Image: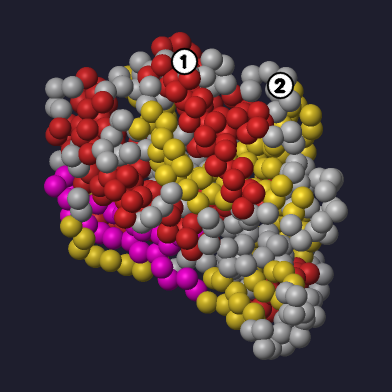
Amino acid sequence: MIKEITILSGKGGTGKTSISAALASISSNAVFCDSDVDAADMHLLMHPEVQETHDFAGGRTAEIDPQACTGCGICMDHCRFDAISANPEGTYTIDPFQCEGCRLCERVCPEEAITSHLEMNNHWFVSRTRFGPLLHATMAAGEENSGKLVTEVRKKARDIARESGYGLIINDGPPGIGCPVIASITGTQGVLLVIEPTLSGYHDAGRVVDLVRSFEVPVWAVINKSDINETLANKIQGFLKKESIPLLATIPFDRRMVESMIHGETIMEYAPDSPPSQAIREIWGILND
Amino acid sequence: MKNQPFKIAIASGKGGTGKTTVAVNLHHFLAAEIPESIMLVDCDVEEPNDLLFYPDAEKTGQEEVTRLVPEIRTEACTFCRKCVDYCEFNALVVIPPVEFAEVNKELCHSCGACSVACEYGAIVEKPEPIGSIATYRSQEGAELMEGTLKVGSAMQTMLIRSLKKKARGKTSLLIFDSPPGTSCPVVATVSDADYVILVTEPTPFGLYDLQLTVSMIREVGKPFGVIVNKSGLGDDGVYRYLEEEHIELLGEIPFEQAYARKYAEGALLSDIPESVAGRYHELAGKILAQREAAGHKQGVRSGYPGNGSPKR
């Protein structure tokens, strides 16, 4: 059976991508998936060679033809997203950044003055890397449907794993707890939480744990930059114990983590004997068990 | 005509670059410069953290935010499937031969199209909680507003819009602390801002995500400047990019392990190091100059003379 693990943190910048890429560099039987589709960084360490490019439809955006608009205002009354406003000229305009793409305005307009078009500026890629296949995506600015895009790349990752006999899929997840995070948890066999010992990191991890638990998916944790604040690191350890979440390793803050990123390498390649690399080997041993 | 507050949004593509740190400090240093009250609005509703830095803040109000979710009354339904045609999000399932009609709440965007479609009154919309909005005041008088998404809800963008609507008219200066990323929740946060501060870190991840964010902000068409946080920690890629793109560098905040420790503890606002305080003081001045340039002053907006008191 293929095992799929998603790496999450709640708070951004705790080290999800650096740790995902480091795990990638030890594995020899895994497919990787950058599920942080709106700020995807994994390619900066993995240097993918793109083999397939696919388009992905975002939401729709509606537009009013000012020539045809009679200024009745029916569209504005129906829009629940405050996307439509009146012009000084007595006609109406749609703010494309507020528009949800529901097309209700288009349907209620008696003059048929409103049309909408699909945004096709999102792409996802199947790539080859020195560690194995990578699935990644780019999204147009302010695009919706990031959850659907995550579902799409994950599906392709599973297809590749099945067809080519890979045993493991590692998803680098997005921050937060909203729709793309939900889409990166459903159907996985486990979530690895990367927590940093700050009040924010602790608070945010608690909310992710609540979310992951609602999907009945097993959770493991690592504490990254563990020596930034030992009091909080201890508090987090207490929390994990109470929640029966196994702590796989603690990774100390190490400037070489940043230096390796600047070199476009994972920490395992840049400083294989550093304390973070040793901790990541331990994590790998447990996850791959 | 109501007075519009001057609105600053603090964003970053990459998470963990220091949005919250900048937002909380800017709030603090601006408050020292101007007599009007300033409200910090935490728009990172998935993971709101601003309040952690005001341990003595008292809650002054709270309300639940709901969205409308349709239900199909099968006794009134004729299974005509017009609602299915109207729904852009594939949230409705209607199978006429077996007289089955159901709403998939997870896919529903609460747009109301199905109720407009239904000619038989078979669709009723019911409120469902998506989160809450609360206001707080610290001992020093700092005003805060925070949105908190209900765990499991995917309606973060809707909650951000409600939060901002609620904040409008509260004070003459609003600071929006944005969620990370570049997708819809971020656009919802910056869409009506008068000025955007982008916070980045001088690393390859920081640079790449900054480039994504800059193209988003340019598309939305907002004036913006960049703060480089944790300077001294990475390389010079970010600086070269800012120079090539003629983007204003608003300031640099040096990486200091001692200050990182204070952030960790939530003690950002006590014993701020001299070096850091100086940077924020300067930043506050730049922001006030932006406000001046935009014609906002003491709650007076140019074009509406005599309407000076920032009421409502």
Which chain is disc 1 placed on? A
Q: In the visual, does B258 lie left or right of A176?
A: left
Q: Quadrant of residue B103?
A: bottom right
Q: In the visual, does B228 lie left or right of B112?
A: left
Q: Is residue A59 visible?
A: yes
Q: Which mark is residue A215?
A: none
Q: Is A138 one of the magenta-colored residues?
A: yes
Q: Is residue B190 above or below residue A100?
A: above
Q: Residue at x 57, y 36 (%)?
A: B284
Residue type highlighted by circle 1: Leu
Q: Nearer the viewer, residue A195 or B254?
A: B254
Magenta portion: prevailing SS class: strand
Q: Residue at x 38, y 28 (%)?
A: B254
Q: Position of residue A136 (x, y in %)?
A: 31, 54
Q: Is A205 one of the magenta-colored residues?
A: no
Q: Which mark is residue B140?
A: 2
Quadrant placement of the C terminus of chain A: top left
Quadrant placement of the N terminus of chain A: top left
